[in-house]
Structures are given as structure tokens and as C-alpha cells.
Amino acid sequence: MASMEQYRFTLRIHPLIMEKMKYIAETNGRSVNKEIEQILKWVISDYENKRGRIHIEEKNQPGFV
């Protein structure tokens, strides 16, 4: 995968939710960060399947599926 600039985002999250996310991420062989990113991709995909594609400038966004 080509290197790309990524946004940094601070997330405040309840400790119980974080512990459960750690468990899920470990079960799926991912870091918590990558697990959250995967979940966000699913949410975007679901949204677009129901409401149509969100059109944004994607030429500088390689690797997003």
C-alpha cells in the first residue's frame, strides 16, 4: 500500500467501550485504530448503499475502499 497522509483525530471514549474495542480488535487481528477505521468504512458503505454515493475529491485519497 502506498504511503499517504492521514488525519489525526483525538477521540474521547468511555473506558468500558475502549476495553471492548480492544477485545474486538485483538480478536480480528487489528489495532484499535484500524478496527475503528474499519467500522467507519462499514458505516460509510451502509450510508452510501442506502442514500447514494458521497461525492468528494478522491484523486488524493488512494487506497480507500
Image (spheres, rainbow, N blue to C red):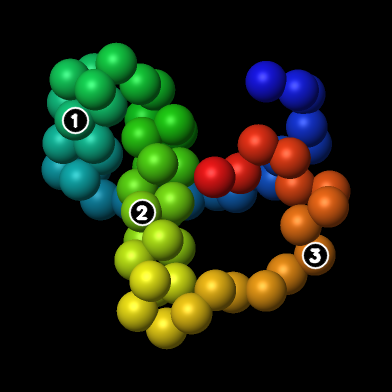
| Picture quadrant of residue 45 | bottom left
On residue 63, which mark appears? none
Q: 10 Å neighbourhood of mark 3: few (<14), some, or many (≥20)? A: few
Against 41, is 28 above or below?
A: above
* Residue 10, x across and y down, in percent: 55, 48
> From mark 2 to mark 1, how far is it between C-alphas?
15 Å
Residue type (three-letter) at the residue carrying disc 2: Trp
Tell me the quarter of the image containing the C terminus. Answer: top right
Q: Nearer the viewer, residue 4 or 54?
A: 54
Tell me the quarter of the image containing the N terminus. Answer: top right
> From mark 3 to mark 2, how far is it between C-alphas?
20 Å
Residue 54 visible here: yes
Residue 19 visible here: no
* Residue 32, x across and y down, in percent: 37, 30
On residue 24, which mark appears? 1
Q: Residue at x 34, y 66 (%)?
A: 46
